[in-house]
Image (cartoon, helix red, strand yellow):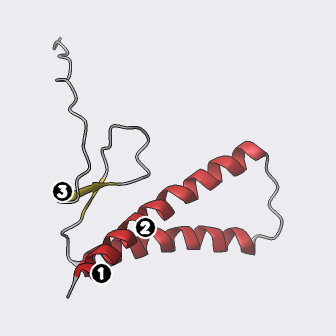
């Protein structure tokens, strides 16, 4: 049986304007693990934002077409969280695109 070894001490990610990686705001704690490559081509960033935002739109449109949907507040809260995460990720990517476009001469 193999022995488990503890992880090395965590060195916190310190945001800096010159960092290539930007932590997503939807990371669930102060130890980010999901990042945006701020130097990725603009069309790739746009595709990433578009994919996440349109996925949520599709789910919400399907919910609208069902007529009445009855559920309790816990289910609604979970559903809202499910929609918020990819929307926030998409908005984070759009923020990177905006910064890059504003920085162009």
Comparing 83 with 99, the one in front is 99
Whether label 2 touches label 1, CB < 8 Å: no
- Label 3: how many residues lie within 10 Å, few (<14), some (14-19) or many (20+)? few
Instruction: Judge whether 34 appears above or below 89 on screen.
Output: above
Residue 29 in percent (x, y) is at 41, 38
Q: Secondary structure at mark 2?
A: helix
Residue 89 in percent (x, y) is at 42, 61
Which label's residue is closer to the chain start, 2 or 1?
2
Seen in the image, is 47 located left or right of residue 20?
A: right
User: Disc number at residue 48?
Assistant: none
Quadrant occupied by the C terminus: bottom left
- Label 2: how many residues lie within 10 Å, few (<14), some (14-19) or many (20+)? many
Whether label 3 touches label 1, CB < 8 Å: no
Which label's residue is closer to the chain start, 3 or 1?
3
Seen in the image, is 35 located left or right of residue 62?
A: left
Q: Secondary structure at mark 1?
A: helix
User: Disc number at residue 90?
Assistant: 2
Residue sitting at x 17%, y 16%: 5
Quadrant occupied by the N terminus: top left
Q: CA distance from mark 2 to mark 1?
A: 18 Å
Seen in the image, is 95 located left or right of residue 55?
A: left
Residue 23 in percent (x, y) is at 31, 52
Seen in the image, is 82 located left or right of residue 98?
A: right
Residue sitting at x 64%, y 69%: 60
Residue topped by disc 1? 102
User: Disc number at residue 19?
Assistant: 3
- Write down the quadrant of residue 96 in the picture: bottom left
Residue 76 in percent (x, y) is at 71, 51
């Amino acid at each position: 049986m193999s022995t488990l070894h503890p992880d090395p001490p965590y060195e916190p990610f310190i945001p800096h304007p010159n960092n290539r990686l930007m932590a997503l705001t939807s990371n669930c704690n102060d130890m980010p693990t999901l990042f945006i490559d701020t130097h990725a081509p603009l069309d790739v960033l746009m595709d990433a934002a578009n994919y996440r935002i349109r996925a949520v739109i599709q789910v919400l449109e399907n919910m609208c077409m069902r007529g009445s949907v009855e559920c309790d507040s816990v289910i609604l809260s979970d559903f809202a969280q499910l929609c918020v995460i990819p929307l926030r990720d998409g908005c984070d990517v759009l923020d990177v695109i905006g910064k890059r476009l504003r920085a162009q001469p």
